[in-house]
Image: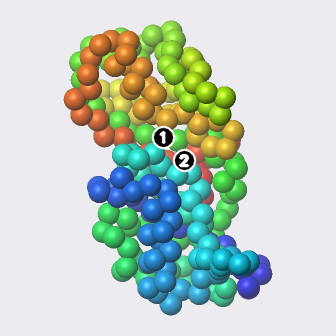
Amino acid sequence: MNENNIAIRLFFSKTGRAKYISALDLINCFQRAIRRTDIPIWHTQGFNPHTYVNVNLPLSLGTEGIKESMDIKLTQNMPLDEVKDKLNRVLPPDIRISSVLYPVKKHTEITESVYDIKIVCDYDKLREFLNRDSIITEKKTKKGITELDIKPYITVYDYKEGSFKLKMPSGCEFTLNPSLLFDAYEGYTGDKITHIDIIRTDILCKDGSSFE
């Protein structure tokens, strides 16, 4: 391990009011927090050096996460629990670090996200909609807006009235936002979702294991 550039991975929750913080603002938040500690952080080189932080899989605005991750680099070793405690003392209350580890996998191995969905709508219509053979929606791409059948890419399980778990593609190669599913539901059924909470609970890799 290069003592001048030690990569570590922060796992944290982003809940409550913090779900409205963008990926860029989240990075700025962590950079400010790190500056308020004596953590020996590594800075990028060049004309505009800055505190190195990298969000592995940014969340969409309005979505909470309980196992988000961010990589930082240290210039010298420090006990990982000490990094966690120092940052939790200066971060906002809706952003809490749960663990700090040495990276095991690359962010390019990420393929899926798992969400807990809590929803208020017409549950009979929702059940019928989720059981459709196809779910056509519009997805923005670099080439513009295209129609896509997202049914083959989503997995719904542990369904109950008012809640279910949802697994969707995420990562460098292909990503689907949960909002596509719920926009399609409203468009197809004409029913309005009166309340929804989306919480990302896990991030999975190609082999099905959790990102770590």
Q: Is residue 36 left or right of residue 122?
A: right
Residue located at (38% from left, 73% from top):
91
Tag on residue 36?
none
Q: Is residue 21 left or right of residue 34?
A: left
Which structural element holds mark 2? Answer: strand
Residue 156's spot in the image, x, y percent?
Answer: 45, 26
- Which residue is situated farthest in the right direction here? 2
Residue 187's spot in the image, x, y percent?
Answer: 37, 16
Q: Is residue 159 left or right of residue 140?
A: left
Scheme of colours in the image: rainbow
> What residue would you read off at disc 1?
114
Which structural element holds mark 1? Answer: strand
Residue located at (45% from left, 62% from top):
25
Q: Residue 188 lies in what quarter of the image? A: top left
User: Badge 2: few (under 14), some or many (20 or more) residues near its Cα, within 10 Å?
Assistant: many
* Quadrant where the image shows the C terminus: bottom right
* Amino acid type for the residue under numbered disc 1: Val
Q: Kindly tell me whether residue 191 is visible in this rendering.
A: yes
Tag on residue 203?
2
Give whichever of discs 1 and 2 has the lower sequence position: 1
Q: Kindly tell me whether residue 208 is visible in this rendering.
A: no
* Amino acid type for the residue under numbered disc 2: Ile
Q: Are marks 1 and 2 in contact (CB under 8 Å)?
A: yes
Residue located at (44% from left, 85% from top):
36
